[in-house]
Image: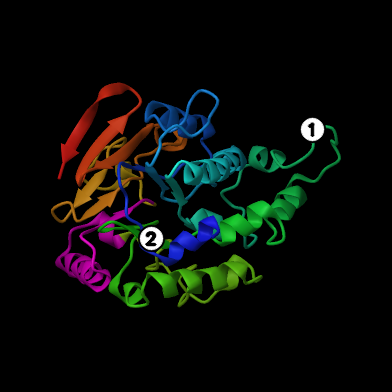
Amino acid sequence: MSETEISYQRLNSSGRIVVIGDVHGHYDGLVSILLTAGIVDERLQWVAGDTVVVQIGDIFGRGSNGKFCCDLLMNLQSQARKAGGRVVVLLGNHEAMITHNCFKYITLSEMYNFTSTLNFTDDPQEKFCQALAKENRLGRWLRELPTAIVIDDILFTHAGLEPYWAEYGIDKLNELMEVCMYDERDYQHFSVSLPIISPIGPLWNRRLISSTKEQNERMLADTLSILNVERMIVGHTPSAIVPGFEAGKTVKRYDDKLIGVDVGINPVYGGYCAWLEIIGGEMIERNTWSEKPIIAYS
């Protein structure tokens, strides 16, 4: 069974779940979190046993080392499975964009990561596109990332799932998104009715996390009911831009039924190396600058 096939089942965790928000190419931040959380050793080898790590998407975009983040996460996926753990990486809107020729958030230095240092005549964008092609390992891996997954009684998805999309069910939604990801049209040519680009779809939705309007609360309750889960964890929307919340901390809505973990890992958003741990149903906020949990809540 391939790593991507986990998108078509519900997983049960027997220990910790470590949730890492949007990385945006900040490799050093990702490594710092993995080391501090006890996921890897100094050689970046898996040491976390049966822990489940969920990276919420947006590995690329705005930063310069998305390639190395992907390489590390792919390596850890195979290591974790051998140890009884899991590394789940979700699809983010930035991965959907770059695999469909939309590079407006990609730095030139990121593209140069895909060129040969011995060949200065390489066209960085051409090499970047080649690496992202569906025939190549990275391109195939990105196209097959799950859009949503349920672990225990928690739904994980990049931006937020409203009832319309929840009605598809996890399996069908992931299948539909994979069809979109393998479609070769440019990003702007997708219909807004499709989940890959819809402004209220699972890769772009901000209204559930951004406000507590009664309509949003009803939509969240309906989604949780449809999928028979207790809460939803999302990224995509930095906590610093959510009214009433601080950078570096999670966003908690509707009696903790909705939790946002985009704490601003990339320096563009503050460089906060923080993450969420779930142990025995308890939610614990942790970061690399404090040895003790910042906030614990059930």
Look at the image and say whether residue 138 sits in the magenta stretch.
no
Q: Tell me the magenta residue range.
A: 207-235
Q: Is residue 85 visible?
A: yes
Residue shown at 60%/47% (left/top)?
106
Residue shown at 34%/34% (left/top)?
274
Which tag is nearer the camera, tag 1 or tag 2?
A: 2
86 or 108, nearer to the observer: 86
Q: Are marks 1 and 2 in contact (CB under 8 Å)?
A: no
Magenta stretch, main secondary structure class? helix
108 or 219, nearer to the observer: 219
Label 2 belongs to which residue? 149
Decide: few, some or many residues near mark 1? Use Cα within 10 Å; few <14, some 14-19, many ≥20.
Answer: few
278 or 32, nearer to the observer: 278
Name the amino acid, label 2.
Ile
Residue shown at 49%/74% (left/top)?
176
Relative side of 262 to 108, left or right: left
Percent from the top left, x then y, of residue 171? 42, 71
Decide: few, some or many residues near mark 2? Use Cα within 10 Å; few <14, some 14-19, many ≥20.
Answer: many
Name the amino acid, label 1.
Thr
Residue 175 disc label: none
Residue 117 disc label: 1
Percent from the top left, x then y, of residue 259? 26, 50
Q: For numbered disc 2, what is the local secondary structure?
A: strand
| Image quadrant where one finds the C terminus | top left
Q: Is residue 20 visible?
A: no
| Image quadrant where one finds the N terminus | bottom right
Percent from the top left, x then y, of residue 195? 45, 71
Q: For numbered disc 1, what is the local secondary structure?
A: loop
